[in-house]
Amino acid sequence: MMEATGSFKGKVVVVTGGSTGIGLSAAQQFLNEGAAAVYVTGRSEKTLNAAVHQLGERAIAVVSDVSQQADIEALKARIEKSGHKVDVLFANAGIAESNALGATSEELYDRIFDINVKGIFFTVQTLLPVLRDGGAIVLTGSIVGNKGNEGLSAYNASKAAVRSFARTFANDLKSRGIRVNTVSPGATRTPIMENGLKLDDEKIAAFDAYLKAVSPIGRMAQPEEIASAVLFLASDKAAYINGIELSVDGGLAQV
Ligand SMILES: NC(=O)c1ccc[n+]([C@@H]2O[C@H](COP(=O)([O-])OP(=O)(O)OC[C@H]3O[C@@H](n4cnc5c(N)ncnc54)[C@H](OP(=O)(O)O)[C@@H]3O)[C@@H](O)[C@H]2O)c1
């Protein structure tokens, strides 16, 4: 085998929600940059297997639901079994579902918060013992954490909580030299559009037209464009960057 090169040469990375979209693209980029092992998680074994088939032999699939503490413990146990210490944790797993105010069930509210908020908190807390001192954590927020997009109050609030976690975790982990940052994507063309937001082709085209009118960059992001910002924040190039939110939105929420 050719010796790996790149800015993550020999590193061990965990990507929650690494089976599709932004997480899958980040996993691919970490591997392209020489990572020795990239753990990718998700709930669907079938989707994870397809991802690992694409990512290759240094990718390790672990079926693990971030809203279930036992599943996160199992992920930690799997990492320990391999004798790995984790250099980079990309806590990315999340769902997006709309919730009409006045017609939101307790079950829907709990699902969004259990995955997007509780899931981030317990992923970080549970994996702390297997994280390497001096490592990096990147959380996936969203520009909507600072916006009031109609019909998305639970999702928007969940992402505001993620951004808040990064501030406090950066302080909580300072004695271990672990940096914690948030990457906040704008609209990104991933399966979340269909699966979570229930957008069909027509609605996605309308969304595209809207972005063309209001966003300086005039289009959605591709997952690779978010992933490259994640790798930057996780890398030594960002050694002095801590506790920030990096919006990667083509300017949509910035202007
Ligand atoms: N796409 C956008 O426009 C956009 C914008 C801002 C922020 N984001 C955020 O970016 C992150 C990634 O989303 P994406 O756009 O890449 O969507 P995606 O393609 O749907 O990816 C979501 C990933 O998370 C996994 N996942 C979902 N629930 C999970 C759970 N309970 N436990 C473990 N894994 C879980 C999914 O696999 P399974 O379904 O098999 O579990 C999948 O691997 C999310 O946090 C999302 O909120 C996306």
Image (cartoon, rainbow, N blue to C red):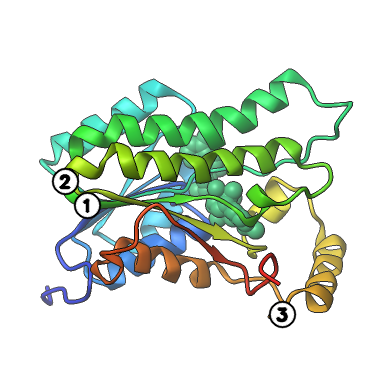
* Disc assigned to residue 216: 3
Q: Is mark 3 within 8 Å of ligand 1?
A: no
* Number of other residues with Cα within 10 Å of mark 1, as a class: few under 14, some 14 to 19, many 20 or more: many
Specify whether residue 76 is in view: yes
Contact (Cβ within 8 Å) of mark 1 with mark 2: yes
In the picture, the quarter occupied by the N terminus is bottom left
Q: Indicate the position of residue 155 as horizontal and vertical percent values.
A: 68, 40
* Disc assigned to residue 135: 1
* Number of other residues with Cα within 10 Å of mark 2, as a class: few under 14, some 14 to 19, many 20 or more: some
Q: Disc 1 and disc 2: Cα gap in Å?
A: 5 Å
Q: Indicate the position of residue 32 as horizontal and vertical percent values.
A: 30, 72
Is 10 situated above or below 71? below
Contact (Cβ within 8 Å) of mark 1 with mark 3: no
Q: Is mark 2 within 8 Å of ligand 1?
A: no
Q: Is residue 176 left or right of residue 243?
A: left
* Number of other residues with Cα within 10 Å of mark 3, as a class: few under 14, some 14 to 19, many 20 or more: some
Q: Indicate the position of residue 105 as horizontal and vertical percent values.
A: 78, 22
- Please tell me whether mark 1 sits on a helix, a strand or a loop: strand
Q: Is mark 1 within 8 Å of ligand 1?
A: no
Q: Is residue 227 left or right of residue 105?
A: left
Q: Amino acid at mark 2?
A: Arg
Q: Is residue 56 left or right of residue 201?
A: left
Q: Indicate the position of residue 157 as horizontal and vertical percent values.
A: 66, 38
Is 118 situated above or below 133? above
| Residue sitting at x 83%, y 42% | 151
Q: Quadrant of residue 208?
A: bottom right
Residue 72 or 218: which is nearer the viewer?
A: 218
* Disc assigned to residue 132: 2
